[in-house]
Amino acid sequence: MPLVYQKVLSQELRIRRALTISIVEGSLHALMLGAAESYFGALAVELGHDPRALALLATVPLLMAAVSQLASSGLARRFGRKTIAVGGAVAQALSLAAIALVAHDEMRALTPLLLGKTAFYVAGGIMTPAWNAWITALTSGVSRSHYFGRRSAISQAWVFVAFLAAGYALKWTAADLHTFVVLVLVGLVARLASALALAMQADVEEPPDELASWSAWRRCTAAVRQGPLRVATYLALLMFGCTISTPFFTPYMLRELKMDYGAFALLSATSLLCKAIVFPIFHRLAMHHGLPRMLLVSGTGIAVVPVLWAMSSHYGWLFFVHVFSGAVWAGLEYSSFQLLMQDIRAELRTEFFSIANSMSGVLQVIGALIGGALLRSHWLSYAEIFVLSGVLRAIPLSVLLFQLPKLRLPGRLRRVPTRLMTVRPSAGALQRPILPAIENEPPAPARVPSEFPRA
């Protein structure tokens, strides 16, 4: 057998082994999300944090994670994308150790938990673009839609199981803080195991992109000039309205409704499961009805969700609300992914999404602080906060109505591979596209309806 052929065969075996290990790594990451990270908000409630602190804990880490992504490409070029990905996973495990210490010692001050949670999300923000580029290179010779579909389905299942198991563990132990310690430690072990799985995977050499020599500032400037800022602006304004209320759904259920953790976990898992089932279906819906209509209908549904929360606290009603919420958030994420990627060079997608997420993050911090101040001062009740959030979510729809017809809509839809990022109690699992793995010329031949719905 020629030496060259042996090398090629050996490389193919290493890549195949790496892709198999990556599915295991995704499952371990999902176990960490479901058992530990998903209950950070509940831990903050049990530690007695007030609405202002809950607002900061829910938004500041996400903002810092979005900003930190801008440093990822430079770090990956200097140290290697595998090193950054493995290092980020280890840093997240260390952050979980700090959060476990906060729960064990019952530290009720805001700073320790805020620092631990921020470090956790910043580590994830830095490692995600590096991991995205790495897994994209590994999957260059396989069907990405099949591979990522399988990987995502297995990860979603693990999140669902881990989230429910953790919720019922908290129910059976009356939400004792030591149970939170155990859950966070389970997440820590799972994250360390996933870091080991990352370290076991092969990396492949890939030629640098055309913009590799550009500075971070130049890449960001080019991304802003090319990017569809109308959609990013709508999403940022929408998230401002959302975070008037979203940090407070967990304390509302646990404190105000005195819901036990079994019921809380079942409700949240319902939206998670609904979103996981519905998200792939939106590709077909968009092919038939068009992205404008999908984005408009989904945005309207998201504006209705908090109003539905305010209408009744009956468990059966909230179950329906969670199903509805998971579906409309899936529609919004799918349609916004497609529109945000339009006209963006593949080499600049990470920078553009980081900028868009940073815009959204700043407004989320402001919105959450306003909502927290209104609740803390008793100016508004939970129900009134929810209605206010619904109104503020609806206002950006006017921006959408005027701006979306001006966009150049894609003639074809891309199959979007996604990765789990976090779990929100009322909206299911938050997913983010694996940007480098999205092909510029998608294979789907069908033309996407581009007409904007008329009144």
Image (cartoon, rainbow, N blue to C red):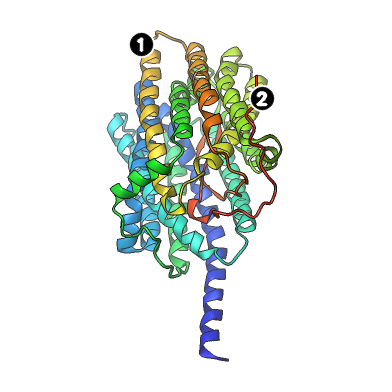
Q: Tag on residue 320?
A: 2
Q: Position of residue 134 (x, y in %)?
A: 45, 61
Q: Position of residue 273 (x, y in %)?
A: 64, 38
Q: Nearer the viewer, residue 351 or 148?
A: 351
Q: Tag on residue 377?
A: 1
Q: Dots 2 and 1: beta carbons under 8 Å? A: no
Q: Measuring 51% from the left and 57% from the top, which residue is drawn there?
A: 25
Q: Nearer the viewer, residue 392 or 271?
A: 392
Q: Measuring 35% from the left and 11% from the top, which residue is drawn there?
A: 377
Q: Tag on residue 401?
A: none
The C terminus sits in image quarter: top right
The N terminus sits in image quarter: bottom right
Mark 1: which amino acid? Answer: Ser
Find numbered disc 1 in the image and state the secondary structure of the residue it sits on: loop
Mark 2: which amino acid? Answer: Phe
Within-10-Å neighbours for mark 1: few <14, some 14–19, many 20+: few
Q: Nearer the viewer, residue 95 or 17?
A: 17
Within-10-Å neighbours for mark 2: few <14, some 14–19, many 20+: some
Residue 417 vertical placement versus 102 (above, below) = below
> Sequence order check: which comes first, mark 2 or mark 1?
2
Total residue callouts: 2
Q: Position of residue 180 (x, y in %)?
A: 44, 38
